[in-house]
Image (tube, coloured by chain):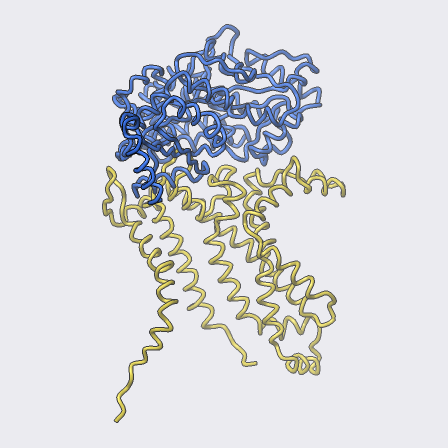
Chain colours: A yellow, B blue
Amino acid sequence: MQTRRTRWHIAVFLAPAVLVYTAVMIFPLFNTLRLALFTEVDQSRVYVGFQNFRTLFFDPLWSEQFWNALGNNFWFFLIHMLVQNPIGVALAALLSHPRLRFAALYRSAIFIPTILSFVIVGFAWKLILSPLWGIAPSMLDAIGLKSLFAPWLGKEEYALTTLALVSVWQFVGIPMMLIYAALLSIPEEILEAGEIDGITGASAFWKIKLPLILPSIGIISILTFVGNFNAFDLIYVSQGALAGPDFSTDILGTFMYRTFFGFQLQLGDPHMGSAIAGAMFAIILVGVCIYLFGIQTRMRRYQL
Amino acid sequence: MKRKILSLAMMSTALVASAAYAQEATLTIESWRNDDLALWQEKIIPAFEAENPGIKLVFSPFAPTEYDAALNAKLEAGSAGDIITCRPFDRSLGLYEGGHLSDLSDLSAMSNFSDVAKAAWQTDDGSATFCVPMASVIHGFIYNKDAFNELGIEEPTTEAEFFAALEKIKEDGTYIPMAMGTNDQWEAATMGYNNIGPNYWNGEEGRLALIEGTQKLTDPQWVEPYATLAKWKDYLGDGFEAQTYPDSQNLFTLGRAAIYPAGSWEISGFNTQADFEMGAFKPPVQNAGDTCYISDHTDIGIGMNAATENAEAARTFLAWVASPEFAKIFGNALPGFFPLSNEPVELEDPLAKEFVSWRGDCETTIRSTYQILSRGEPNLELETWNASANVIRGAETPADAGQRLQDGLASWYAPHQ
């Protein structure tokens, strides 16, 4: 009888990834969650249980900032869902049109901003929209719409929406590429069969292609959700850690940064900062779970 | 390295007779002033080493934004330099309490400094001083002399004259009356509120009363500066809401704006950027003849790493930093950063001279939020940024801003409860 040999190669091949991932992701994550349960009294660390979370949610000074940041985060996400993803799908649909010329050129041009650094994007848009040196006011002036210009980044009511749209501009290439790939994978025969049944043009898109790319749209939505609730860079680069004007662009990322590392005269508080990071983690976890168990399992899939 | 030590050892045995008395020490200086690297290497270090053979200095600065984190990490790891450049107030106090900075109260050269100058690097009760005050910055207004001459405007001394001048510049329309934006928020607080404020709360008197809890941020002397700031709105450029700090600097140095609410640290930059003549006037008083108060804010100090192995050499260096000789080199090389020693230093730059001359005419104070009051959450300094920007944008009334700040302060600061 042959004894079962231990399959060492599985462990060996898994080890590098598991070790690296544990060191740079899993350990810091749990350590952050652990840190949230402590506070500092007289330069020594004291265990306080969920006190930091109680402060965060129920102390008016903290909770006001927290809910403001969370609300702003939802608005940021909503703009992406309403603007970025539909535009991404529309662009992909246009690009996959067989008779479109220069498709490769458009595809690259639209995708390029995605690979730019946040710092460059934030700075460039800040200059474009600057009321002093920007080209936005003079361009509007050239078509006689100067009156529509406002210092958007400096107005409480517009600043967050403006930044969300800048972020959309930067990242619209990602849904476009994913949907484009999904569209290309739809077999010609299905479309031809539809054509024989009289389904062409726009109705072919709505009735055949869209149902087939729905799983991709779902994936994009969840990527957008995670990305937006982890967002930080763009706001920090263009509005600073105080996320002005009057905290109207403050999102969880900037709130966490300010608390954790401190800013100017405010000293950093790693424990409250970790509590905020923990809350962010929980929000993202819940969001992803709702999607995975509530939506993705019910989605109809078609065997192509 | 080993070979170097070996050869040094051999040399020292050869020169044992002469070397026996001289100290052999290399002091490393931690700093955030990477802009000043050339100044240290070309002027300060040679001047010190010439007088103190046997002590070598190495200036190793970080970028300002990285300094605090990097310094903390190095101190924890025991690899920080011998000399530490001190931020004012709580950052350095924290280092002292953590045992990283030595008590320098017994350094005889400390008597060269006034109590206000030392306050930034003392324990709350004033019993220990742990950094030598190095430089301060003074607030005021820098203006475009050509613009003032063209429009026939004199330097305003009272608030009425100040607003009359702004009105005149606005009517003429050639220049933007005042270059300031609210996008970065701190300008509104630092160059706005804490610039004009001391004239309202009578400098040190009000600042200390606020710390003791005998005055409140809702008192008129703390709210009125906000009301005055709110009036600035009409004289700022189009779209000031999105105007950043560099935007404001450029507007002024390009000659498009007439007045710039300033801190003296702008002087050297403006000297190289602007091609017109500049003048400066101090924050206008409310009525002619009132005592004037200026913000002469202690900004840089220098102290000793408690873990240094070269304590004796470090103390020699710090005593030299406290001397008038250092003050003269430093003050002239960095116009706009004013030495804090009691002995007056002759400065050459006309604009810097103008700023520093106010010390003779006015009572000096420091920014109201820096000592003790920004220790808690919400942070009063950051709240002041926010309130000043809000008030200028017209998003909050001065009274509301005062009330909000008072409530925030009272929530954690016992003397106000």
Residue B164 in view: yes
Q: Position of residue B223 (x, y in %)?
A: 45, 22
Q: Is residue B114 or residue A235 the one in the foreground?
A: B114
Relative vertical location of residue A201 with respect to residue B276 in this rendering, above or below: below
- Picture quarter with the C terminus of chain A: bottom right
Query: Residue farthest to the front?
Result: B14
In which quarter of the view is residue A82 placed?
bottom right
Q: Position of residue B391 (x, y in %)?
A: 51, 28
In screen coordinates, is A62 left or right of B267? Answer: left
- Picture quarter with the N terminus of chain A: bottom left
Q: Is residue B10 or residue B140 the one in the foreground?
A: B10
Residue B224 in view: no
Residue plotted at (59% across, 54% down): A170
Q: Position of residue B259 (x, y in %)?
A: 60, 21
Q: Position of residue A161 (x, y in %)?
A: 57, 47
Residue plotted at (53% across, 64% down): A220
Residue plotted at (37% across, 56% down): A282
In which quarter of the view is residue B373 placed?
top left
